[in-house]
Amino acid sequence: MPTGLQRRPGLAEARHLVGEAVHPVNIEKLSAWLPTVLMGTSDAAFGGSQGSQIDNTAGRFDLDAITY
């Protein structure tokens, strides 16, 4: 009788559902210790001078990183 109760289909399905519910909880517990990293880049040209002429231009590359 105990073996029949342990192997019934409803119990296996319940164990599967509990396992699916526990997995996201474990991931959320771990994510509290992992930082979030945001990175961005930009590439452009800039320059300037006196008057209305824009001379002396040069390239510019920026890399930004934020963690929290």
Image: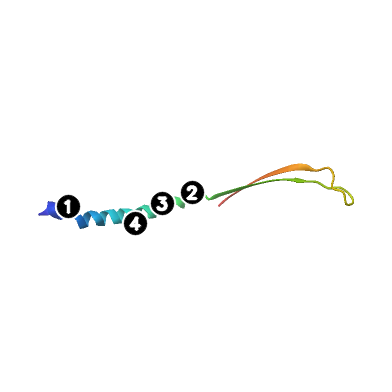
Q: Earlier in the sequence, mark 1 or mark 2?
A: 1
Secondary structure, mark 3, is helix
> Within the image, what quadrant is residue 13 found in?
bottom left
Q: Earlier in the sequence, mark 3 or mark 4?
A: 4
How far apart in space, not on screen, are marks 1 and 4 (Cα)?
A: 21 Å
Mark 3 vs 2: CB contact within 8 A: no
Residue 34, disc: 2
Residue at x 17% of width, y 55% of height: 8
Q: Which residue is mark 3?
A: 27
Q: Which residue type carries mark 1?
A: Arg
Which tag is nearer the camera, tag 1 or tag 2? 1
Q: Position of residue 44 (x, y in %)?
A: 72, 46
Q: Is residue 16 left or right of residue 57?
A: left
Secondary structure, mark 1, is loop
Q: Which residue type carries mark 3?
A: Ile
How far apart in space, not on screen, are marks 2 and 4 (Cα)?
A: 21 Å
Q: Which residue is mark 1?
A: 7
Mark 1 vs 3: CB contact within 8 A: no
Residue at x 52% of width, y 49% of height: 35
Q: Which residue is mark 4?
A: 21
Q: Which residue type carries mark 4?
A: Ala
Residue 16, disc: none
How far apart in space, not on screen, are marks 1 and 3 (Cα)?
A: 29 Å
Q: Position of residue 65 (x, y in %)?
A: 61, 47
- Quadrant of the drawing holding the N terminus: bottom left
Q: Which residue type carries mark 2?
A: Leu
